[in-house]
Image (cartoon, coloured by chain):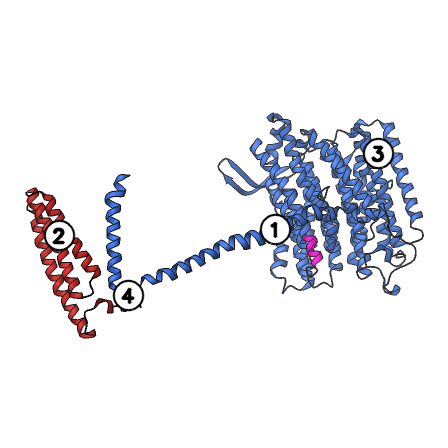
Chain colours: A red, B blue
Amino acid sequence: MPINYYIFLSLALFAIGTIGVLTRRNAIIVFMSVELMLNAVNLLMVAFSKFHGLADAQIFVFFIMVVAAAEVAVGLSIIVMVYRKIHSVDINLLNRLKH
Amino acid sequence: MKDFIYLIPLLPLVGFLLNGFFWKSMPKKTAGWIGTLAILTSFVLSVINYVQIEPEGFTYTWFSFITAGDLNIPFSFQIYELSSLFLLIITGIGTLIHIYSMGYMNDDKGYVKYFAYLSFFVFSMLLLVMGGNYAIMFIGWEGVGLASYLLIGFWFKNKEFTNAGKKAFIMNRIGDLGFLVGMLLVLYHFGTIEYQELFAIMPSQGVDTSIMNTIAISFFIGAMGKSAQIPLYTWLPDAMAGPTPVSALIHAATMVTAGIYMIARSNVLYNLAPYAQDMVAIVGLVTLLVAASIALKQNDIKKVLAYSTVSQLGYMFLALGVGSYVGGVFHVMTHAFFKALLFLGAGAVIHNLTGEQDIRKMGGLAKKMPITHITFLIGCLAIAGFPGLSGFFSKDEILMSAYAKNPLYFYLGLAGAAMTAFYMFRLYFLVFTGTYRGAVQQDKIHESPGTMTFPLIVLAILSVVGGYVGLPHLFAENHALANFLSPVVQNFQVELVPASTEWILMGLSVAVVLVMIFVARMKTKSGVVKEAKGINKALENAWYVDDIYKGLIVSPLKELSHFFNNVIERGLIDGVVNGVGKIVYWSSTKFRLIQSGQVGLYFFILVIGIFSLLLLGLWIIPTF
């Protein structure tokens, strides 16, 4: 398959992820969108790895996956702690930085 | 003597520092004696120097002053005939005035400060005449200007007096620009400003005459400011605001003669610049006539003497301008004697009348102040050119040289001499003869103390005998002063007048003087000074020159500065600076709103930022 299709798909996934991060109110959905962005990049990496015939990108995909996993772990625990405080996952209520 | 020459200026400097730093704690008598002894010692050293002087003189280099690349200006003194003579005049008359001041300023609160300033003045003046190059002379030149400012505005609580001091200093500064320009031109064209080198190479350098004229005229502008020639003379009458001994020292004997010293020193330069010489002579002539005319109608004793000084300085410049450098220096010497005498005498009169300076309120003081009276009379006779006294010989020499150059100069000079005789004797008759018209109780008027009369007597003697060093060749083979100064200056004009002509001219000038004295007696017999009308009013107001300057120069400058202050400084510049502050404040109120605390907004801005950076990096920059 021509590489363009993979690029478009990856781009679409990345765009959806970005808009999700910016637009959604629920913190967990925001995290999902971040995961979506990371996976879009993974897809792109693998596609190019097959395109060039080099395995370097696939190694990098492993790195990304590891980092994503760690990030989710930490991020979700923060959400749990925030939930214990304000009993909601609405990000618009988190405006303490204003002061 | 050569190794001790630096003591001559150093002692007054030490006197200045001692009196200056300790003026609060110094007892009065000590301060006076410190100042007087310093200058007296300098006088003794000057006498020793004078006696030992050799024809070629010597240069004493103290230290290397300015070295920059090729330029090397040492702090050097050059002692030869001309500077030795001036040293004697400055320290001698300076000592007499210090002694006089001890009596005159006795009741003044600023006694110690006064002596400090006087010592500083003497120091600067000595630097001026002893300097071995134009730079040292300039240091002294500026120093005497400063001292003049300090001393004129000595009674600083009075706004008018301080204004007079400012006026003197500012007019001096205008002249100083000319001096600097001349000095720099000399440096540029000849590579050196050291007198010995400069005057040796100057004639043979083949520099264009127009440049020589420019240099000479620039220096003369400096002299115009310092020695009160037209147009920079109006500070001198106002300078009478200072204590009278100051007027005697600075504005009669020393500072105002700095210009003449400078030109006499640079006689090599002026001989190569004929156009400049003519200008010097003409300016001197005009000044002499204008100032004498103003003095005819002045009613303040010091103002008459002030305008007389300006007029006599005009004579000196006339002499220099026609090439008679010896004549100019001779007149400096005799003028120093009789003008200082006249000023000190006037000071005695003012002191004893507790501050009265208007001659319409004086009269009949001869019997009450005999010594002052006799010495003042001698001074008047000397300045008028009465035969046998010093003023006669020096003025005669100048007039003869003027005749040799151009007979018209002689006749104009003679007119000036007539006016001089008239106004001086008008002054004398109104002050000392007739009946007393003033307000002070008659039994309170008495002769001055010894410290004040002693200098008067000494100066009177000098005014009488001081002329015999310069006998014209009609009377004696030996013009002692010319012989003394001959290694330095040339006096080639005087011999050009044939003997018979000289007798006639001399007789003419004597006759004029005697007639004018008689006319003055007639005019002042009644003792009443009439109200001035018409041209007399113009003379009384000094041809309204001060008002002309005020309207033409001072007021426009003031308006200009007000404009700059209000419109440009306050409006524009302050507006800009304050405006910047206001903009920063306004923009910060706007920027503050970005920090809303909403994380979503932060993300949004983050994405926008990344997007822009990518755009920038991948599209916009590669296309350039």
Secondary structure under tag 4 reads: loop
Q: Is residue B214 left or right of residue B390?
A: left
Q: Residue at x 78, y 57 (%)?
A: B452
- Looking at the image, is mark 3 or mark 2 nearer the viewer? 2
Secondary structure under tag 1 reads: helix
Q: How far across and down, in percent of the image, does residue A52 sit? A: 8, 42
Numbered disc 1: what chain? B
Numbered disc 4: what chain? B
The residues tagged by marks 1 and 3 sit, at their Cα atoms, a distance apart of: 46 Å
Callout 4 amino acid: Gly
* Magenta segment boundaries in residue numbering: B152-165
Mark 4, residue position: B597
Position of the N terminus of chain B, as image quadrant, is top right
Numbered disc 2: what chain? A
Q: Residue B349 or A4: which is nearer the viewer?
A: A4
Q: How far across and down, in percent of the image, does residue A47 sit? A: 8, 47
Position of the C terminus of chain B, as image quadrant, is top left
Residue A41: assigned label: 2
* Tag 2–tag 4 contact (CB < 8 Å): no
Packing grade of label 4 (10 A; few <14, some 14-19, many >=20) is some
Packing grade of label 1 (10 A; few <14, some 14-19, many >=20) is few
Mark 1, residue position: B561
Q: Earlier in the sequence, mark 1 or mark 4?
A: 1
Asked if the magenta segment contains residue B282, the reply would be no
